[in-house]
Structures are given as structure tokens and as C-alpha cells.
Image: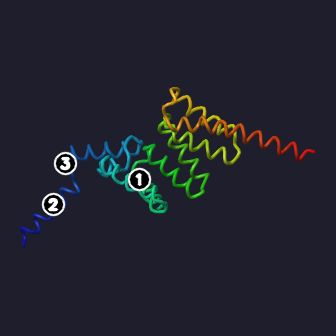
Amino acid sequence: MAEEQKTEQQRQTQIIDPTPFRRKHLTEVLYAFLDDKISLAELKGISRDQLFQLSEAGYVRFKHGRLEEAEKIFQALILLDHRNAYFHAMMGAVHQKLNRPIESIMEYSQSVKINPKDIASFVNRGELYLRHKNYRKAAEDFRSAILLDMSGANLWANRARSLVIAIKRSMDADTSRKSLRGR
């Protein structure tokens, strides 16, 4: 009985008082997390593969219209790795489908901030701006997407090219409505 207590105390002591090497490692990891050099997933030891599998599950739910479930999954993924542009882009898409334009624009903006070459986020954000008649910002986003794909191979950039035409038509329709009101 006394030996069991002694063994239990040693096990507890090891957890409470780690070796100097372990203490140094924990301190470095904690400072890296606080300096935003590693994510919560890295701090907790969650692998990229596990995050990818979870994102695949969220994407499948999104594609099948189970938006609330997809939203929960991508919220959790953003908490675990807030520096992943794909997670923010998918969260923006979920918000867009749920008719939350402000949240969607914020998520797409975060995605573009993390990955300035994310053509899909530029196009989706530009489309939201276009729907809300913010033509200047829509044109800027479409321009950015088009400049990232000068060859015309990317489908998202091609969508941006066609939406530029939609901006022109929408602006023409707005000016004709204004001129009719003025009469």
C-alpha cells in the first residue's frame, strides 16, 4: 500500500514538475502560440491530416445543403487553425449561402489576407459587393482575380471576367433608372 502511494506520488510529481528540457520545450511552444506562430491545433498536437479530414466532412455537408452542420465544422476548424485560408473561404461560402453578406465578406477578406492568391475568395467577395451595388469594390476584386490568372485557365477568374460585364450592365441599368426618375 505504501509503495503504491509512492509510485502514485512519483507519477504526479513528473506531471507537475517536468524535466528542465520538457519545461523549456513547453515554454517555447506556449510563447510561439502567444506570438501567433503556431495554431491551437499545433499546440494540441492535432495533425494536418486530421484537420483535412474534418474539412472534407464540412465540405460534403456544405455541398449537400446541410449548412448548419458545415458552419459548426468550419467554426471549429477556424478555432483550431485560424491561419488557414481555405477554412475562412469555406466559412464565407457558408455565410453566403445563409444570406449573411457581412459575415461572408469578412471571412473572404480574411482568406484573401492569409492567401493573396486565392482567386475564388476574390470572386465570391466581388460578387457580394456587386449584389449590394458596391461597384468599385466589386471591380477591384474582379480585377485582382483576373490579374492572378492572365492565361484564362482558371474557372474562377473566367467567372470574374463575366461578372465585369454584369457590373457594366448593372451600372447602365442604374443610370437609366435615375434618368427616368429625373423626368
What residue did someone put label 1 on? 77
Question: Do residues under tags 2 and 3 come within 8 Å of each other at their CB atoms?
Answer: no
- Along the polypeptide, which appears first: circle 2 or circle 3? 2
- 57 displayed left or right of 112: left
How many neighbours does mark 3 have within 10 angstroms: few (below 14), some (14-19), or many (20 or more)?
A: few
The residue shown at (34%, 46%) is 30
Above or below residue 60? Residue 178 is above
Amino acid found under the numbered disc labelled 2: Arg
Question: Do residues under tags 1 and 2 come within 8 Å of each other at their CB atoms?
Answer: no
The residue shown at (61%, 37%) is 162
Amino acid found under the numbered disc labelled 3: Thr
- 133 displayed left or right of 18: right
- Residue 151 is situated, as x and y percent measured from the top left of the image, at 50, 26
Foreground of the two, 173 or 112: 173
What residue did someone put label 2 on? 11
What residue did someone put label 3 on? 19
The residue shown at (55%, 28%) is 147
Q: Secondary structure at mark 2?
A: helix
Q: Secondary structure at mark 3?
A: loop
- Along the polypeptide, which appears first: circle 1 or circle 2? 2
Mark 1–mark 2 Cα distance, whole angstroms, equals 34 Å
Name the quarter where the C terminus is drawn: top right
Name the quarter where the N terminus is drawn: bottom left
Mark 3–mark 1 Cα distance, whole angstroms, equals 33 Å
Closer to us: mark 3 or mark 1? 1
Q: Of all residues shown, which one is farthest toward the right?
A: 183
- Residue 70 is situated, as x and y percent measured from the top left of the image, at 45, 58
How many neighbours does mark 1 have within 10 angstroms: few (below 14), some (14-19), or many (20 or more)?
A: many
- Along the polypeptide, which appears first: circle 3 or circle 1? 3
Which of the 4 image quadrants contains residue 177? Answer: top right
Closer to us: mark 1 or mark 2? 1
